[in-house]
Image (tube, coloured by chain):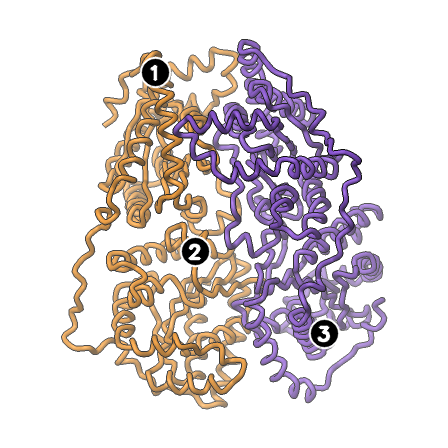
Chain colours: A purple, B orange
C-alpha cells in the first residue's frame, strides 16, 4: 500500500514555481464559491511522524483564505472533553457549511497509537475502525466532503529526516525523544497504519496517500487535490449524491402496531400515587447524588404524543434533582448555527458534564417522526437515521452514560379530552395550537412511524420504554420507577 | 443592612398554600410571554451558607417551566476556563433573549470567599467589585434584567440549622466540615458581605436581601419578586430604559484628525523588504513557540480602511505561526445565537485556549465605526461602547493576554487605486462591492469616528498602533515588528 509513497519523490523547483500562482488563485476562487455552497469540507490529516504534516497545513493556510479555514489539533483531551463521550470533541469542531475544517490528529490518532503501543488488541482496533466508518458515512451522507490525507515517509527517509533535523542547530529543538523512539517502532506503525487505511478506505471516504519526503512535492500535490476534489463536488448534481434508500414498505399485514397492545387501563389511586411518588422521588434523589459523586451522567430522551404529559413528568423527575446538576433541553426549531451542521450536532452540543442529567424534551427522534411524516427530511435521510441514531446512542452508553428513552403513550380520545381541558386554563392555552389539531389528523401515520422507530432503535444498549400514559399518576410513578431501577443497576 | 433578615421570619402555611396556585400560574404565564420579549433575565443567587439557596432554586425550577430556565453552578473552573480570562465562564453561560438564567455561585463568590479567607486585601476586593459594577452595567445597558438575590440567615439561625441537619440521620450527610468552619468565620463573612452588597447595590442592579430561615417564606418571597420584576420590566416602555448618553459634539475646531498626521510616505524597497520580512518572521516564529510553551495567548484586533491590506498582512503573520495554534476570526454578520446576546458575547466566545493566537479580522470596534456611522447602534449604545470595550480589553490583558490593536491606514487616493486594481484580478473581484464604494463616500465621517475611537480606547494596557499602509511592504514589516517587540517584552 505504501510502496509508491516511499520512493523519495521530489518536485522540480521550476515546475513548482510555475504552477503555484495559478493554483493559489484557483484555491482562493474555490473558497469564495464554497461560502455559498450547502456543504462543508472536512480534511483529516494523518500520517508518519516527520512527513511534514504541520508544514503542509501551514502552507495551505498561507495559500488559502485563513478566515474560512479552521485547523483544530486534538492533543490530550481537556477535562470538559473527558467527561463526554469519545467523539464529542470531534463533533464540536465540525466545520459549518461553506467552510473548510482541518482536523489534525483526528479520530485516527488514538486507535493507531494505542495499537502500536500494544494497549489494545486486534479486535479492539477493528471495532474502533468500524465505528469510524459509521461516523464517516454519517457525515458524508449528510453532505460533508470528507478528504482523508495520509502523509507518508519511508523508513530510510524518516531516519534521514530525524538525523538532519538534529544536526542543524536551528532545528535540533524539534527532535524529541519520541521521534527517536519512533524509528524503532516504525515497522509496526507501518503495519497498523496499513490495516487502518485498508479497513477505512471506503467508497464514500477513501484515503489518499501522499509522499511527504519533499516539501514542494507534498504541498503542490495536496493543493491540487483539494482544488480538484472540491471543484468536482461543486460541479456534481446534488441528486447524484443521494444514496439510494432501501425500499420502505411496511411488512405488517394489518394496521396494528405495538402501540395497540399497550395497556392504557393502568392507573393509580390518589393515595397510592402520593405514597409511591414520594417513595421514588426520595430514592431518585439519593441515586442522583451518588451518580453525581461518581460522575455518572444520565441522558433522558422524552418523546410522546402531544399532551401526553411530558411536562408534568419532567416536573416530577426534577423535583428529586438538584437544579445545579441537570438541564432540560427543549427541542425547538434549529438555530442557524445548528442548521449549518449535521442534524445530530445540536444534540451532541447539549450533553452536560460528568455526573449531570440532560433531559431532552423531544429529541433526535424528530428525524424519524415529525420530519418523516411532514416530509422535512428526504426518505433516504430518515431511513438512514435509524442507524445513525443507534450509533449515537451507543457512543453515549459506551461512555457510561445512563440513557433512558421514554415514549409516553396515550390514546386518541384521551388526547382530545386533554386539548379541551387545556383550552380552559389560561396559562396552558398557549400549549394548544392549530398545529396540534393538524398533527392529530395524522395520528395513524404517526402510529406507524412510532412503531418503526421502536422496532429499529430499541437496542440492547438503549431500549425504549413505552409508558402507559392515560392515567397521569401511573405514568409519572412509572417513569420514576424505571429511572431508579436503571440507576440502581449501574451504581 | 442584614438586621431585617435575621429575625427568623416565617410564613403561615395556609397563606402559602392559598397563594401558591396563582403565583405558579402567573410565573408560567410570564415565562411564556418572555419568550417573545427582547431581553433575557439573569438571576444571581448568593448568600449565607445554609440559607436554602439550593432548595429555593430547585423550587423555582419546579414551579416554572424548566425548559426555559437554565441554572449554571460555577464550581472550580475547568482547565478550558482557566486558560481564558476570569469572566469568560460567566459570559459563556449568559442566557439568550427570552430566557431566564440563574447563576449560582456567581461572580460574587470568588471575591467574598477570598476576602474572608484573607487571601486578598481591601483594595483588591474594591477593585474586583468595581469591575463587577462595570460588567453589570454593561449587561443592564444592553437590556438584561438583572436580579441579584442575597439569601440571608442570622448567626443564631445558621448554627441551629447546621445542628438540626447534623442531628437528623437523613440529612447528616449534607453537613460538611466547611459548614462547621463557617460558624467560626460567620462574623467576618457577614462583614465582607455587607461591604460587597453596599458597593454593588447600584441603581441599575440593586441587591435584594431575603431571609432564608423559613422555606415557605423564602420561596414565596422570591417567586413574587421574580413575577413582579419581570412583569414590571415587560410593561416598561423600552424608550425609558435608554440611559441618556452624553452630548457628543466634537471638541475639534477643525476637521483635522490624528490620521492626518500619519506619515504615509514611509516605504520599503523590495530587497530591504524581503530581508526584514524574513528576519521578523523567523523571530516571530521563535517567540510564538515560546509563548505557546508558556501558555501565553495573543489576541490581535485588526481594523483598517477597506482595501488597506489586512488580508495580506494576516498572511505574512500566520506564515510564522503554527496552524494548530491560531485561529483567524472573520467578523461578519452575527448569527441568530449571537444576536440574542450582548454584542461582545460573539467575541468572548472565540477566545482561544492558552498559548494560542486569536486574530480578529475586524473586531468589536465595529460598534463605534460602522454601527455608529450607519446607525445600526443607537447613539447611547455606541457612546457607552468605548468604556465597555476598554473593560473587555482590560480583562484580556489582566489575564496575561498579549493584545495588539492595529489600525491599518491608507489615504483616499490609495484606496481608489486598489479598488481599481482588484477589479482587474478575477479571484479578487468578489472583494469589491458597491458597499465599498458607498463606505468610501463617508470617508470623512469614518475618519472622525476613527479619531474618536483611538482617543477613547488607546489605553495604557491596550494601546492602538496606527500602521502606515500606503506602502504594503512597509506595513507588513511594521506589523510584524510591533508584534515581535510586544511579545519580547512579556516573554
Q: Within 10 Å of the Cα at label 3, are there few (<14), some (14-19), or many (20+) other Cα atoms?
A: some
Identify whether A161 is placed above or below B46. Answer: below
Image location (x, y in percent) of residue A197? 80, 60
Q: Circle 3 sits on which residue?
A: A164
- B271 w.r.t. B353: above or below: below
Identity of the residue drawn at 42% across and 83% down: B419
Instruction: Give the Cα separation between the discs numbered 3 and 1.
Output: 84 Å
Please tell me whether mark 2 sits on a helix, a strand or a loop. helix
Please tell me which residue is depicted at 46% across the width and 34% down the height of the picture. Answer: A431
* Viewer-nearest of discs 3 and 2: 2
- The spot of residue A157 in percent (x, y) is 79, 72
Up/down of A402 relative to B89, above or below: above
Would residue B63 appear left or right of B374 to someone viewing this image? Answer: right
Return the mark for residue B245: none
Q: Label 2 near label 1: C-beta < 8 Å?
A: no
Q: Nearer the viewer, mark 3 or mark 1?
A: 1
Which quadrant would residue A301 be assigned to in this image?
A: top right
- Chain identifier of the residue bearing label 3 in the image: A
Residue A210's quadrant in the figure?
A: bottom right
Contact between labelled residues 2 and 3, with CB atoms less than 8 Å apart? no
Chain identifier of the residue bearing label 2 in the image: B
State the SS at label 1: helix
Q: For marks 3 and 2, give the CA distance.
A: 45 Å
User: In the rendering, at what x and y percent does residue A291 appear?
Assistant: 60, 28
Residue B18: mark: 1
Q: Are marks 3 and 2 on the same chain?
A: no
- Quadrant, the N terminus of chain A: bottom right
Q: Which residue is mark 2?
A: B346
Quick one: SS at disc 3? helix
- Distance, label 1 to label 2, CA atoms, is 45 Å
Left or right: B437 as drawn, with respect to A114: left
Amino acid at each position: 500500500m505504501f510502496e509508491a509513497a516511499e520512493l523519495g519523490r521530489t518536485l522540480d523547483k521550476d515546475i513548482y514555481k510555475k504552477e503555484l500562482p495559478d493554483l493559489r488563485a484557483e484555491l482562493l476562487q474555490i473558497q469564495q464559491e464554497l461560502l455559498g455552497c450547502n456543504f462543508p469540507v472536512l480534511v483529516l490529516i494523518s500520517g508518519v511522524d516527520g512527513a511534514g504534516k504541520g508544514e503542509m497545513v501551514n502552507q495551505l493556510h498561507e495559500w488559502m483564505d485563513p478566515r474560512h479555514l479552521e485547523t483544530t489539533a486534538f492533543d490530550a483531551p481537556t477535562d470538559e472533553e473527558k467527561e463526554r463521550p469519545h467523539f464529542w470533541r470531534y463533533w464540536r469542531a465540525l466545520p459549518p457549511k461553506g467552510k473548510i475544517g482541518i482536523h489534525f490528529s483526528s479520530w485516527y490518532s488514538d486507535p493507531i497509537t494505542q495499537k502500536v503501543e500494544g494497549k489494545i488488541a486486534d479486535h479492539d482496533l477493528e471495532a474502533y475502525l468500524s465505528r469510524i466508518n459509521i461516523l464517516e458515512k454519517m457525515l458524508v451522507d449528510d453532505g460533508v466532503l470528507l478528504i482523508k490525507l495520509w502523509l507518508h515517509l519511508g523508513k530510510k527517509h524518516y531516519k534521514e529526516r530525524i538525523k538532519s533535523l538534529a544536526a542543524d542547530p536551528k532545528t535540533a529543538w524539534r527532535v524529541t525523544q519520541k521521534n527517536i523512539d519512533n524509528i524503532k517502532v516504525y515497522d509496526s506503525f507501518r503495519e497498523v497504519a496499513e490495516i487502518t487505511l485498508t479497513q477505512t478506505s471506503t467508497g464514500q471516504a477513501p484515503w489518499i496517500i501522499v509522499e511527504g519526503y519533499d516539501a514542494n512535492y507534498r504541498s503542490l500535490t495536496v493543493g491540487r487535490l483539494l482544488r480538484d476534489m472540491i471543484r468536482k463536488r461543486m460541479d456534481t448534481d446534488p441528486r447524484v449524491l443521494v444514496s439510494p434508500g432501501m425500499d420502505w414498505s411496511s411488512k405488517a399485514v394489518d394496521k396494528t402496531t405495538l402501540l395497540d397492545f399497550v395497556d392504557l387501563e393502568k392507573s393509580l389511586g390518589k393515595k397510592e400515587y402520593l405514597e409511591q411518588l414520594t417513595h421514588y422521588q426520595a430514592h431518585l434523589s439519593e441515586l442522583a447524588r451518588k451518580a453525581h459523586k461518581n460522575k455518572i451522567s444520565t441522558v433522558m430522551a422524552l418523546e410522546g404524543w402531544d399532551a401526553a404529559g411530558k411536562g408534568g413528568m419532567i416536573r416530577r423527575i426534577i423535583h428529586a434533582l438538584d437544579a445545579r446538576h441537570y438541564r432540560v433541553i427543549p427541542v425547538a426549531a434549529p438555530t442557524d448555527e445548528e442548521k449549518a451542521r449535521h442534524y445530530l450536532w445540536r444534540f451532541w452540543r447539549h450533553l452536560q458534564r460528568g455526573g449531570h442529567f440532560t433531559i431532552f424534551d423531544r429529541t433526535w427522534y424528530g428525524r424519524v417522526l415529525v420530519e418523516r411524516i411532514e416530509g422535512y427530511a428526504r426518505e433516504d435521510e430518515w431511513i438512514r437515521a435509524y442507524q445513525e441514531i443507534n450509533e449515537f446512542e451507543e457512543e453515549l452508553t459506551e461512555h457510561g452514560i445512563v440513557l433512558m428513552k421514554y415514549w409516553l403513550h396515550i390514546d386518541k380520545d384521551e388526547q382530545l379530552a386533554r386539548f379541551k381541558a387545556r383550552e380552559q386554563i389560561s396559562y396552558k392555552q398557549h400549549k394548544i395550537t392549530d398545529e396540534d389539531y393538524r398533527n392529530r389528523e395524522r395520528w395513524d401515520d404517526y402510529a406507524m412511524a412510532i412503531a418503526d422507530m421502536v422496532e429499529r432503535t430499541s437496542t440492547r444498549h438503549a431500549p425504549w420504554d413505552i409508558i402507559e400514559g392515560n392515567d397521569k399518576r401511573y405514568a409519572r410513578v412509572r417513569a420514576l420507577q424505571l429511572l431508579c431501577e436503571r440507576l440502581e443497576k449501574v451504581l
